[in-house]
Amino acid sequence: MSDIVKYETQGRIAVITLNRPEARNAVNGDVASGMEAAIDQMEADPNIWVGIITANTEGEERPVFCAGADLKAINSGQAGGLGTKRGGFAGFVYRERKKPVIVAVDGLATAGGCEIVLAADLVVCTTRSSFGLAEVKRNLIAGAGGLFRLPRAIGQAAAMEAILTGDPIPGERAYHLGLVSRLVEPGKALEEALELAGKICTSAPLAVWASRKVVLAAAYEDDATLIDLTNQEFAGVMASEDTKEGLTAFIEKRLPNWQGK
């Protein structure tokens, strides 16, 4: 793992940090390949159940979680390296995975940076954060999922205004619109995301992963397909060792010892 994308673990939680503060954490080829490698590591490790994506914004008066694509890389003919075959932009926005990812934002997430946020499962942000798709201001369009994910997250009217004007949505409004799960004071996003991830880790991981899969499918599939998918995931979870453990723990009035199998 390169220093440009840091990977650390805290118990069952993987913390992935964008580490290009000098470039407003913009995505270049190194960031894309580093993010893909980090997600690969998270998914492959049976001891990791939840991921967090955050960014190094230390010492910045106006912090930026991620400014999106590195325009210098695009201008020098390196646009093709800003994504990966499996993950799309930043090695992440279209990446298939089973484990939930929380994004911890303290500052501006704009353009592709906002699309990274929209590709996560839960968002924690600070009161000084904002989210925007500013592409129209540069005669571009958001090409990494933002045009269809933002309306799903906050509704068509609010999303249309943000997309057509390019103006960012303040963190507090994003919280009230439903994009953000938890809103905290500046400097507290990662701490809050770790608390939330820890709470998720007290739940049975197989059930968490299966439930996430069905919830995400609801945005794309019809009811019949969703019923089949729910039944399929339900059967898999019921047949697991953790289900036996969960029922036994309930009967014995103790906390379950989840194994993720």
Image (cartoon, rainbow, N blue to C red):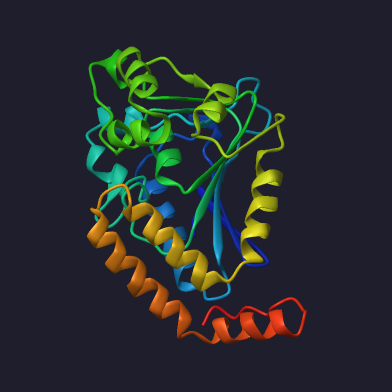
Q: Position of residue 153 (x, y in %)?
A: 41, 35
Q: Residue at x 63, y 82 (%)?
A: 247
Q: Is residue 84 above or below residue 141?
A: below
Q: Residue 78, located in which quarter of the rendered image?
A: top left
Q: Residue furthest right?
A: 253
Is there any visible trace of residue 69 in the rendered image?
Answer: no
Q: Residue at x 33, y 27 (%)?
A: 71
Is there any visible trace of residue 239 in the rendered image?
Answer: yes
Q: Is residue 73 above or below residue 256?
A: above
Q: Residue 47, located in which quarter of the rendered image?
A: bottom right
Q: Is residue 101 above or below residue 70?
A: below
Question: Between residues 30 and 172, which one lies in front from this camera angle?
Answer: 172
Q: Position of residue 34 (x, y in %)?
A: 43, 53
Q: Residue at x 63, y 64 (%)?
A: 201
Q: Position of residue 224 (x, y in %)?
A: 23, 60
Judge from the rendering whether residue 110 lies leftward or rightward of residue 18; answer left or right: left
Q: Is residue 202 above or below residue 172?
A: below
Question: Between residues 203 and 7, which one lies in front from this camera angle?
Answer: 203
Question: Between residues 123 and 80, which one lies in front from this camera angle?
Answer: 123
Judge from the rendering whether residue 224 lies leftward or rightward of residue 100; answer left or right: left
Q: Residue 198, located in which quarter of the rendered image?
A: bottom right
Q: Position of residue 46 (x, y in %)?
A: 52, 76
Counting every numbered tag in the picture gives 0
Q: Residue at x 37, y 50 (%)?
A: 92
